[in-house]
Amino acid sequence: MGNKAHDPNVERVFVRAITGNYGLKDEMKRLRSLPRVVKGKDLKLDGGPQHYSRHYMEPEDGRTQTLHIHLEEYAPGGKTSKHGHVNEAAFYILDGNGYEIHDGIRYDWEAGDIVVVHNNCVHQHFNRSETEPARALVLKTKPMFLFINMLFQQTVEKEETKPSPTQGNFVPRDDEENYNHPAE
């Protein structure tokens, strides 16, 4: 943890090069050789201290060219950077409760809700609980937008570098067995 692999200031691969012979034979062979099941337990969270991500699928891993799918975990009282981008995103809230600020308007959410971030929306994600974490599965078409040269993305307010006032010694749930429901 603490790895800033997805830091906006670090160079990343957003769209893989399409190179080689003109034809699909080699690309189909390559794609068919890749695992069809990605084991979440093999992927580690990065980021912190208030906002963590586990990236399941994105162009740099070679499995997809048009989707970016990741899990976000928000520490108790945590928040993300305030940012905007051309692409839309859908957040399926796995657990916890929180809210968004989209273009200055607040939208509350809880487990089971779907949050839609529209194209060109300046937004920020917040965990409303001061004692419990919250998680969301995020699906984005960002790589497709970048592929067609719609490149706008900007950070308006940077990610926090210090823990939230209420999170204490929070550690994100990297090794959790049940990813859908809290233990009963």
Image (cartoon, helix red, strand yellow):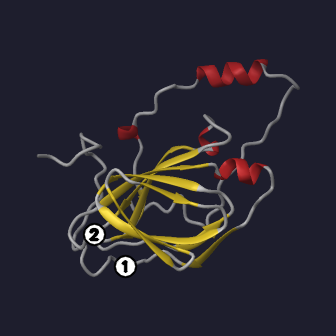
- Give how far across and how far down residue 75 sits, in percent: 31, 66
Identify the residue at image location x=60%, y=20%: 33
Indicate which disc, 1 or 2, sits on the residue closer to the N terminus.
2
As rendered, which of 86 and 4 lies closer to the eye?
86
- Give how far across and how far down residue 22 sits, in percent: 88, 26
Dot 1: element:
loop
Residue bearing mark 2: 76
Dot 2: element:
loop
The reply, left or right, for residue 47 in relation to residue 184 is right
As rendered, which of 27 and 10 lies closer to the eye?
27
- Give how far across and how far down residue 157 sits, in percent: 54, 80
- Give how far across and how far down residue 73 sits, in percent: 37, 58
Q: Is residue 13 visible?
A: no
Q: CA distance from mark 1 to mark 2?
A: 13 Å
Q: Which amino acid, by three-letter code, is at mark 1?
A: Lys
Label annotation for residue 9: none
Q: Which amino acid, by three-letter code, is at mark 2?
A: Pro
Q: Is residue 21 above or below residue 120?
A: above
Identify the residue at image location x=73%, y=25%: 27
Identify the residue at image location x=23%, y=45%: 181
Marks 1 and 2 in Cβ contact (< 8 Å): no
Residue bearing mark 1: 162
Dot 2 crowding, Cα within 10 Å, few <14, some 14–19, many 20+: many
The reply, left or right, for residue 44 in relation to residue 95 is right
The reply, left or right, for residue 161 in relation to residue 77 is right
**Number of marks in the rendered image:** 2
- Looking at the rendered image, the disc whose residue lies closer to the viewer, 1 or 2, is 2
Q: Quadrant of residue 131?
A: bottom left
Q: Is residue 134 visible?
A: yes
Q: Quadrant of residue 79?
A: bottom left
